[in-house]
Amino acid sequence: FIYGHSYGALLALAYCNKYQEHVAGLIFSDMNPYPEDLGKMISLTNGETDSIMNAGGQYHNLIQNKMNGLPYDTMLYRNAFEKTRNRNYLIRLDSIPDAMDRTFRHRNFQVFQMIMPSTFSLNYRDIISKIRVPVLLISGYYDFVISPAQLKSLSSKFQNAQYFVVPDAAHIAFIDNPKDYFPPMIKFIKQNQ
């Protein structure tokens, strides 16, 4: 079996395409393989994040200035935006586990910007239709990368796929809601051994 989460799901998909004879099944977690859909989801989430910030009293004036083209503190906005987006669409826990906090502190945006163009260098639309092994698609309900409707639609593009939406979880569903994230994977693996 091969498992990939987020960008790693695309790597797992590419590996599975090349080496299917060595893979019993693919677990594709929290990723959208279509750049146009991913872009729409990110734009939607960005707008929703601004709306959440606007509705709360703390950042209302900041968002109003931004929306009206008036000067605003861009650093304050960026920090508030990231905090709000992360809390609603990345990981929904009230407190961030230490391992995730360390991960957030050590993100390297320069590396991200270097690898991002290659992320969609493959035509995943063509690859997906060629995958013969069983596939489990899994994602958090509040994931900013792929919506439940997109996940369901994506499952129909594979030859043999099922999907599961993890309730009350965002992009890092395995941290948000492990009790609902792992059982479908265990069941999938047992069914396809």
Image (tube, grey):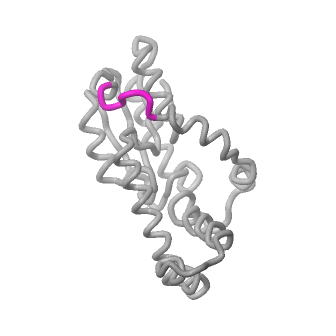
Tell me how many marks there are: 0
Q: Which quadrant holds the C terminus? A: top left
Asked whether 10 falls inside the magenta stretch, the response is no
Q: Determine whether 86 is above or below 58 in the image.
A: above
Q: Position of residue 7 (x, y in %)?
A: 52, 38
Nearer the observer, 181 or 35? 35
Q: Determine whether 65 is above or below 37 in the image.
A: below
Asked whether 121 falls inside the magenta stretch, the response is yes
Q: Where is residue 62 in the image (x, y as percent from the top left)?
A: 58, 81
Q: Residue furthest toward the front?
A: 70
Q: Which residue is drawn at 57% across and 86% down?
A: 61
**Which picture quadrant has residue 45?**
bottom left
With 56 as the anchor, is 42 left or right in this view? left
Q: Residue furthest toward the top?
A: 21
Q: Determine whether 122 is above or below 145 in the image.
A: above
Q: Residue at x 44, y 51 (%)?
A: 145
Nearer the observer, 146 or 49? 49
Q: Which residue is drawn at 31% across and 21% down?
A: 132
Q: Position of residue 123 (x, y in %)?
A: 36, 28
What segment carries the magenta color?
A: 120-126
With 70 as the anchor, is 30 left or right in this view? left
Q: Residue at x 31, y 38 (%)?
A: 162
Q: Where is residue 120 in the image (x, y as percent from the top left)?
A: 44, 34
